[in-house]
Amino acid sequence: MCAFDKNDDLGNLLQAGYGAPPPREAFVRGLGERMRVELPATQKAVAPARPRRALSVRWQWALAAAATVVLAAGIAAIALRPDGGTPQRLPSVGGPPGPEPSSTPEEKMVPLEIKLPRATVGPTPRNLTPSPHLEKPDSRPRPPFFVPEGTVNLALGKPVTASDSEPIIGELKLLTDGDKEGADGSFVEFGPGKQWVQIDLKEPCTIYAVVVWHYHGEGRVYHDAVVQVAGDPDFIENVETVYNNDYDNSSGLGIGQDLEYVENYQGRLINAQGVQGRYVRLYSKGNTSNDQNHYIEVEVYGKPLGAAAEHGTAADRRAKDAAKARKSS
Amino acid sequence: MSDADLVRAIQAGDETALEALYQRHLPSVWRFAFSRLAGNAAAAEDVVSETFLAAVRQIGRLAPEGGSVAGWLIGIARHKVQDLRRRSARLSAALSEKITAAPAAPADDPSAPLETAELRQRVGAIMDGLEDDERAVLESKYLDGLSVREIADRLGRTEKAVEAALYRARQSFRAAYEQAERAPR
């Protein structure tokens, strides 16, 4: 028998179990005043962002059709190239390793070991509809990803900056603290619209993979996920884009050909193909559950450039060649 | 005036609208913090302050029609509670125990008998587990004493929609409560 059978009973139960004495009047007045002081600064600092979900169905179809045309044109251009359409870029995720395995001992390739958080089975994903831009969700363990021996997580404990220096929730250092759990207190929440976070690896590095965990407590899709690497903190020169699923260029960083994906506890492994740089920047623009942007952890796997040169392997040289080829294409 | 109207007015710099939104949602955020922090009013004040200050700094980028303002604020408060616990753990193990331990008698509510501590913990956990909309309508109806019409005005919905939301919220609460009663203690 339930403890409450009528609405009055529910009211009494809530009063007893969730009621609270009123806050102090002085506290309420003081906080109200502090908020008023903050308001003008807020108005100067920010501008309303149009939420992605505001697009009408007709516009979504139009954008999808336009993106499909662009994609088809790109495929045709590749197929008509004199080299027979050999892709200059390896699959970004889940595919074969970037640098190919080598038979010589000095180039030993090893599976990348990534410590995963506890597997979470979140609530049913909300607002998810099949789309040609959305990868089919796959909860199976990720296939092994091979990297040169000696590859480490260069991002661990490294400083983080962001487009929004005052996150709504959490602190920037949570991105590189090694904690990948989806629990409260493990992630940073940034405001709505396009936001970026940036990790300073402190020295030029060769990067083989970037692994990112947005919020994975529920199956959701973060929009316009773009990952770039550069040698300067302002991302002005020699910017390499290693991942981009902004299929309609709504973030203005170019049309991406990677697919959107549903978050899960395994994070997203992005094949960086041995790109070189010191700074790694990750963009996003809201998600299917709300307009905010969240990060639990970002890992950057690679080697300091000095170390790579010192132990110079054929795999590293091939990685450099791949980066050059990507640039020229 | 609905929450969305108030958000738009605040984004245009209207201090009166800010005050209205603050007064409207303060009870809910306060109750949430008070419940999660086992009745520690000083800690609840910290959480409520940080929540509303973070909200006002970000409200310029909030899409007025993008979702529940109450849910957004509770979401911020939920993580401010975690931030506070982390800080407390670093600063003082004793304070951490005071805040994070399963609530015994509420610290600043000495009139509450011990047997209500368990009830508070259970009801607080159930309310925290409800969908944002469900929690908001239950609080508005049963704790703030608002009519269905008034709740509809606040949320910018029809009375029918609010009645449906109330029905769902009661069902969810009832199911969670019964499950908690059956669970081993």
Image (tube, helix red, strand yellow):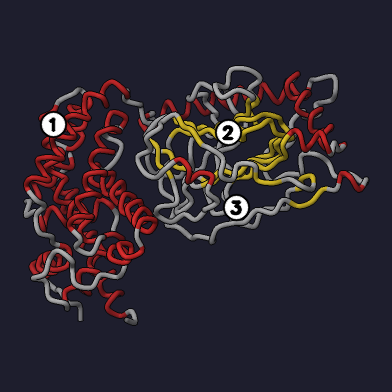
Dot 3 corresponds to which residue? A138
The label nearer to you, 2 versus 3, is: 2
Q: Residue at x 17, y 78 (%)?
A: B115
* Type of amino acid at the residue the image marks with label 1: Ala
Looking at the rendered structure, the kind of residue marked 3 is Asp
Seen from the viewer's position, the closer of residues A288 and A175 is A175
Left or right of B23, for residue A200:
right
Q: Amino acid at mark 2?
A: Asp
Reading the image, the residue beneath label 2 is A200
Label 1 neighbour load within 10 Å: few <14, some 14-19, many 20+: many
Left or right for A11, reference B131: left
Say whether disc 2 or disc 3 marks the residue closer to the N-terminus: 3
Front position among marks 3 and 1: 1
Q: Is residue A49 left or right of residue A128?
A: left
Q: Mark 1 sits on what residue? A: B17
Which quadrant is the N terminus of chain A positioned in? bottom left
User: Do labels 1 and 2 touch, CB within 8 Å?
Assistant: no
In the image, residue B42 lies at what x, y percent?
19, 55
Check disc 3 and report its element: helix, strand or loop.
loop
User: Image quadrant of residue A22?
Assistant: bottom left
Question: Which residue sits at x=53%, y=34%?
Answer: A225
